[in-house]
Image: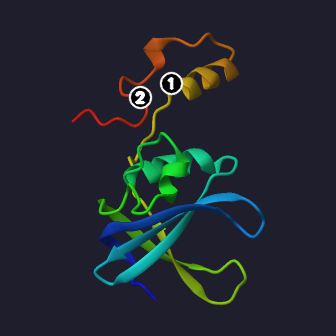
Amino acid sequence: MHPEGRFEAEVRETGVSRTRNAKLQVTVAFATEHGELVERFSLEGGALEISRRQLTACGWDGRSFGNLNREPSPCAGVRLEVQVVHEERYDGKGQVARVRIPGPAVLRDEDAAAEADRLLGVEPTTEHRAPHARGEVPF
């Protein structure tokens, strides 16, 4: 099993498919100094936005999931830092190495802030919004 920790990885290939339960997913194969890793990113429900951010970090241009089925992958050769963690398998039969792609520590979304203001019963205003929206880092 791949060791835990943070590693420089290279994207080798990508593909869009369905799970056994017919859910859409993108599979990404990575290579590190310790070997190959495969991670699957769900395109269903609330996981879609997280997967989009992580796939963008892998070099996806965000225009079409279909492009991720091309050979060679448009993301092939992209180098990035990944975090590998060991987790229990969903079926309870041992552990599996999972890939996490570190992102910005704080995400800011103007639409979410406006919706949260409405929960307080106040009109959304820009004076309460962070100056750097959508996770952009000002340096």
> How are the colours assigned in the image?
rainbow
Percent of width and height locating residue 74: 38, 55
Foreground pick, 61 / 52 = 61
* Residue 117, quarter of the rendered image: top right
Q: Residue type at mark 2?
A: Ala
Q: Report the front residue among 29 and 89.
A: 29
Identify the residue shown where x is 58% and y is 20%: 114
On the image, the x and y values in percent for residue 112 come to 58, 28
Figure check: 1 above or below 131: below
Q: Mark 2 Cα within 10 Å, few/some/many (few <14, many 20+)?
A: few
Q: How many labels were placed on the picture?
A: 2
User: Looking at the picture, does residue 18 appear above or below residue 90?
Assistant: above
Q: In the displayed structure, does residue 116 sit left or right of residue 131?
A: right
| Image spot of residue 77 (x, y percent) | 30, 63
Q: Is the C terminus in the top left, top right, bottom left or bottom right quadrant?
A: top left
Residue at which label 2 appears = 133
Who comes first in sequence, dot 1 or dot 2? 1
Q: Furthest-right residue in view?
A: 21
Determine whether the residue tagged by mark 2 lies in a helix, strand or loop. Answer: loop
- What residue did someone put label 1 on? 110
Q: Amino acid at mark 1?
A: Glu
Residue occupying the point 54% across, 49% down: 65
Name, please, the residue furthest toward the front: 71
Q: Are marks 1 and 2 in contact (CB under 8 Å)?
A: yes
**Mark 1, secondary structure of its residue:** helix
- 62 relative to 19, above or below: above
